[in-house]
Amino acid sequence: MINKLLLEGLHRNLEYASGAKANLDGRLCFDVMRSELASSQRSSYDKGCAKLLTCEGGWTAAVAAERGYEVDPSCSLCGGPLDPPWHRLVECPCVEDKRRSTIPADVLSILRDAPTGEQKRAAITGLFQHPADDAARPLELPSGHVISLDWLTPQVYQQLDDLPSC
Ligand SMILES: [Zn+2]
């Protein structure tokens, strides 16, 4: 149990570190990618590609050129001026058939209709801001303050008295 809690804490810290790298005020959620990697329906190749994309390791020509390599940044498939991952995922006409057979139509519609930066990141890397970041936080009291539950005590005793005995 302690090992599990420590491991979850380590993962949470890594999620916060990833969120900071992505300029988020919170953490990135790896749950979708984690479940894909645990799926028995995915091949080793699929899982390797998923890991690669999660780490933004999908180096298209435009990415390589942006990172200092002297390469032609244009798309080698359609000849478009730039070939960032977004072009391959959403725009390149040469992979339209594969795209339509892989990405659900409603998701593709969202991606083509002015997506937010968060939606673009989720589409390319499978990562998004953790939904727990929006959840209500536990009550925090200033140190030295406690909530008195004395008023509840008679009711609790009465409830215990009312319980059927074995
Ligand atoms: Zn292209």
Image (cartoon, rainbow, N blue to C red):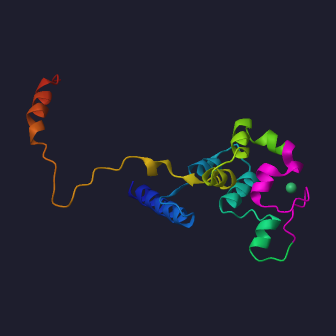
Which residue sits furthest front?
Answer: 114
Which residue is at 77% across, 65% downward?
A: 59
Horizontally, is 141 left or right of 66 in the view? left
Towards the viewer: 152 or 43:
152
Which residue is at 49% across, 60% downward?
A: 11
Q: Would residue 30 be visible to someone looking at this image?
A: no
Q: Would residue 121 be visible to someone looking at this image?
A: yes
Towards the viewer: 15 or 48:
15
Within the displayed image, which quadrant is ligand 1 positioned in?
bottom right
Horizontally, is 165 left or right of 90 in the view? left
Where residue 41 sits: x, y (%)? 70, 43
Where residue 4 sits: x, y (%)? 44, 55
Which residue is at 66% across, 63% downward?
A: 55
Horizontally, is 149 left or right of 18 in the view? left
Which residue is at 86% across, 73% downward?
A: 71
Towards the viewer: 70 or 45:
70
Where residue 3 sits: x, y (%)? 42, 59
Where residue 113 sits: x, y (%)? 71, 44
User: Can you say whether 156 is above or below 81 in the image?
Assistant: above
Is residue 85 magenta-colored?
A: yes
Rendering quarter of residue 162: top left
Is residue 79 magenta-colored?
A: yes
Rendering quarter of residue 149: top left
Region rendered in magenta: 72-97
